[in-house]
Amino acid sequence: MRRHVAAIVVGAAVIVAGVLLARLKVNPYIYFAGYVILQYVVIATAWNILGGYAGYVNFGTSAFFAMGAYTAVVLIQWTRAPLAVLIVAAGLVSGLLGLGIGYLTLRLRGVFFSIATLALSIVLQTMIINWEYVGGSRGLSVIRPSGAPFGNYVVFLFTVMTGLAVTAVVVARFIERSWVGRGLAALRDNEEAAECMGVPTLRLKLFATTVSGVLLGIAGAPFPYYVTFVEPNSAFALDYAVDALAMPMIGGTTTWIGPVIGAALLGSAQQLATVTISSELSLLLVGVVLVAFVVLAPEGILGLVRRLRGR
Amino acid sequence: MVAGLLLGGFYAAVSLGVSLIFGLLDIANIAQPAFLVLGSYAAYVANADYGLDPILVGIALTPLFYVLGAVVYRVYYGSFERRGEESLRGLVFFFGLLFIIEVSLSLKFGVDYRLAQASYLGQSFEIAGIGIAFRYLVPCLVGLGMTLALYLFLGRTFYGRAILAVSQDQGALRLMGANPVRVKTIAFGIGIAASALAGALLVVITPVIPSTDRDYIGRMFAITVLGGMGSIGGTLVAALILGVAESLMATFFGPSWSLAVSFGLLLIVLAVRPAGLFGR
């Protein structure tokens, strides 16, 4: 219990640091890039709860993210609801979607589950493209609310995302250390054996898919205000699915710190490559690093560190 | 309806590689559609720069793609299958490969639509009042030819039977004195080569951009699963069903919905009858 308190204190300290950083008037690009990296911390952590802990590979990360973003768009169009409401609603919608995906795991395991999530992502994208209210395929401009805290809206979003990232990491850490995490690890290694030992596999899987969905949804909620122009191709971009997979794989999938390390490293590298070379090349970087890591260092950076220490 | 059947013949060509690699070898090669698009671009370049016939180029390129496929399988085998980690990490490996091919193509060629040209492709003829364009007929016929060829190869030749055997019982094959890794390398190479040739057909039918591969992930796997994993005849039937369903959907609801057909079908089949129509 004391360790959890310590984790929450550390988390709070990170949020305070984020707020202080927002007070400092450094180069505005820092906030712009920092937001993206923090967003990836949330996405990678959320993916890892299902993919790393439970061993179910989700290729439809962008579907959950975009559902969060489009829930926000609908609410902005309809009532101009405040950001906090958007985040909660996005979490609910994507969480429900996660619950639905969880029931799919009853019939589908391994590859079939992964393909089904990819299929889900494409079906949802088609529905959004054909839904004129949220802009259809042409997209929709979103106007940021005036009078933002901290003077600048991007800075405000940066602070919000810091909070979301800390929340996601604390949740992931809590799951990992509790009996839920041990149960998920058991079903990752052998689902039948876990079931026989009395692990409530269905309930655990539903829990993992739902939590993962909620976190991906809240990561998407501030997205419309961040980009101010939402269109299906960018919200449903395959990049999110690849990044969500690559980051935990690079960091290490079995612990909460792995996705954070991966997101920080790969996210920063991507931002640097985007600025200095081109955004296309930064995507290529992700693909190459991902393949290199799964082939050469299957346990990620954490695994490498562990191996070096062991010797 | 006729257009759908013609489309279906082409879809059969597209799905043969997946049927072989995923259906028979149980290797979830998500990168398959990327090889398809790679084949499209190879045929396009030869067609646009040298004026060669795209389909003949596709056939000529199959040995090259066979070698490429064999190399990919060797890397996959050495990194994952031998260690017994094929499911999760192998999947990620292929997903990364798909992404690398797609992004490399868009770096090289940009995101403009590309289409192959040949003198006979613009023509069409009429049977009983239904116009049939060569642009669709030729890929359909080639697709049917490929399906027949693969069917005969698997049933009649030594290596074909070895591939069927490796899908049933690897250990037994090893006891019979054959090397399962070698047989799988051959099968994987053929699968990739088939996809590349299908890619040449694709660039004949419709304009291609690097991200076209995403549209075909769903179609390929929907057809393979619906047809029953690894059944060549089932693949053809499923391809025809999907082709007809997609063209009906495009007629009645608009073309933007046709993509959802394959994925919707896939979700339904996976949820209701994962073994497919002609499942083992």
Image: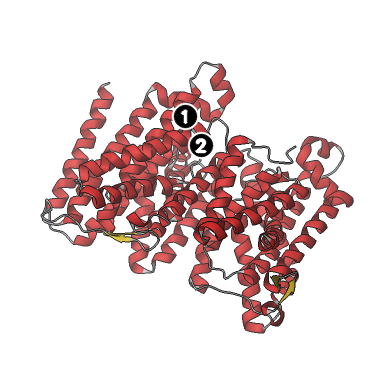
Q: Are marks 1 and 2 in contact (CB under 8 Å)?
A: yes
Q: Is residue A187 above or below residue B3?
A: above
Amino acid under label 2? Answer: Tyr
Residue B85: percent from left, percent from top: 60, 39
Which numbered circle lies on residue A56? 2
In the image, is A31 to the left or to the right of B218?
left
Determine crowd level at label 2: few under 14, some 14-19, many 20+ residues with C-alpha closer than 10 A.
Answer: many
Q: Provide the residue designation for mark 1.
A: A205
**Element carrying mark 1:** helix
**Element carrying mark 2:** loop
User: Which colouring convention does the figure follow?
Assistant: secondary structure
**Along the polypeptide, which appears first: circle 1 or circle 2?**
2
Residue A208: percent from left, percent from top: 42, 32
Residue A91: percent from left, percent from top: 32, 39
In the image, is A279 to the left or to the right of B82?
left
Tell me which corner region of the image, top left, top right, bottom left or bottom right, holds residue B207.
bottom right
Amino acid under label 1? Answer: Lys
Q: Is residue B175 above or below residue B25?
A: above
Instruction: Look at the image and tell me in which quarter the N terminus of chain A lies.
Output: top left
Q: Residue at x 37, y 45 (%)?
A: A43
Q: Residue at x 62, y 83 (%)?
A: B49
* Numbered-mark total: 2
Instruction: Return the residue nearer the eye: A200 or A302.
Output: A200
Q: Chain of mark 2?
A: A
Q: Residue furthest front?
A: B129
Determine crowd level at label 1: few under 14, some 14-19, many 20+ residues with C-alpha closer than 10 A.
Answer: many
